[in-house]
Amino acid sequence: MTAEGSDFLQLDIGDAPPGRRSDWLASRLRHAISDGRLPVGSRLPATRALAADLRVSRGVVTEAYQRLVEDGHVAGRGRAGTVVVAAPARTKEQTTSGPPSAGTIFQPAPGIGVFDSLRSTPARIDLSPGVPDLTAFPRTAWLRAERTVLNDLSAASFGYGDPRGAPALRLAIAHWIARTRGITADADDVLIVAGVAQGLGLLAQVLCDNGISEIAVEDPSSLGARQHLHDRRLATPPIRVDEDGIDVAELVRSGAPAVLLTPAHQFPTGVVLGGERRRELMRWAADGGLIIEDDYDAEHRYDRPPVPALRSMLAEQVCYAGSVSKWLAPALRVGWMLVPTRYRDEVVAAKRFADLGNAVLPQLVLAHLMESGEMERQLRFVRKRHRRRRDAMIDALRTHLPDAVVHGAAAGLHLTITFDAEFSDLDFAAAALEQGVKVQPLSWHCQRPMSPGLVLGYGSSPASDIAEGIATLGRLRR
């Protein structure tokens, strides 16, 4: 059996990145062998014929064939040509039947993999919250900083590092939070973690070991954060949030020894913890309560400078967490924590046994960018872009969903909308996904019954997609 021409590749080589056509062609051939378009025993086209068909040099095809020979997938048989002798093992992704349906994702009691399922489900327009403009990642500045770091890096620096994080990044973050969040800290106070999610898991583990069995949370609050706490077998008693933030009187009545807060821009309502509530909370903490401060979206304030971090007011009763996920990229998995002294050594030990510390090279690159002023420039750039997208979403909501109440417009990367009506926001989100628009139902993030609503991210979508997505939601509400 002989494969004729390039039809079995199903793509034009114009899709290949410049300078990497051999890599691209070898990859397409592997896929063709794996999925049966080139079965074992079939003969590949002659290099000259395939090169002519794809309009590339014969060397590109020859090199791609050689990659497959080295992989053991094909073998040269002289006059018989190049023959497929072994197929790559099919991965689970290749054999699955497809992404889950909208109805199976949006359940009243979402499972631990619900966000993975939602992310993997294709959609024309993604209005998921919590994602910045990933096209704005400063690739040129990052590569320039990486070259600078590598040029100065000693051979010893490629060994195992400090599980607390690279000293250069810990110092850069100490400087950063002093400039931007009013926090006084030394490099030794900073622990580098793989995002706030890991930091929360490590802290929860330590608190459990110290006899704490529950951490109060805002209601509504992040479903993902609650899932991390539940994974450590911690209860999450809900505390009401209103226009001034968390109800501290209810927190006191709950008797919870600790509370997880997003005071700079509460998720998902967007409210800022008010001044009187801050004073009440500080009195609660001074009496022995522990505050876990997730400094969520503090960098993305559009109407005025962000309020100071709680950690700046009462350091030994506040565990502070931040990350670069919302202003660079979640994929970097770089965050930081400042832990009260009484728990610090145990949290560092938990980090050590979790992974021996974050990868060092990205830490050093980030430290260089922070200390050089590049991060301030990046933040100014993305704030302007995010603000324009927020404005586009608000305009679209006024036009297509005039009955929606908009919350949290002053900061962040998302808006929350609620409705004075009786319907299932789970069904609404499922219907939107079936129309190719990805959103999150507000009820996911609530532990007690509340008005139906949606949480809509605008950071990662252009204005045209935002307008089209909201228009689709408007048609579904009619």
Image: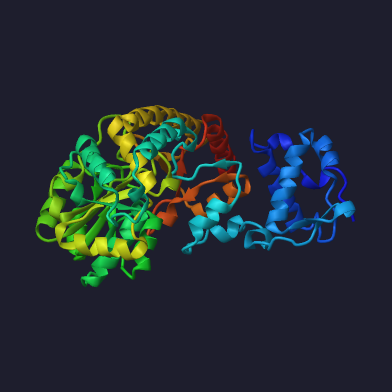
Can residue 423 be spotted in the picture? no
x, y percent for residue 139: 46, 34
The structure residue drawn at horizontal position 21% and vertical position 70%, both measured from the top left corner, is 210
x, y percent for residue 168: 27, 43
The structure residue drawn at horizontal position 68% and vertical position 62%, both measured from the top left corner, is 90
- Quadrant position of the C terminus in the picture: top right
- Among the 4 quarters of the image, the one containing residue 230: bottom left
The structure residue drawn at horizontal position 33% and vertical position 66%, both measured from the top left corner, is 353
Position of 42 relative to 180 (above/below): below
Q: Nearer the viewer, residue 410 or 197?
A: 197
Left or right: 51 in relation to 425: right
Q: Nearer the viewer, residue 257 or 467?
A: 257
x, y percent for residue 287: 9, 59
- Among the 4 quarters of the image, the one containing residue 417: top left
- Quadrant position of the N terminus in the picture: bottom right
The structure residue drawn at horizontal position 48% and vertical position 50%, both measured from the top left corner, is 440
Q: How is the image coloured?
A: rainbow
Left or right: 326 in relation to 317: right
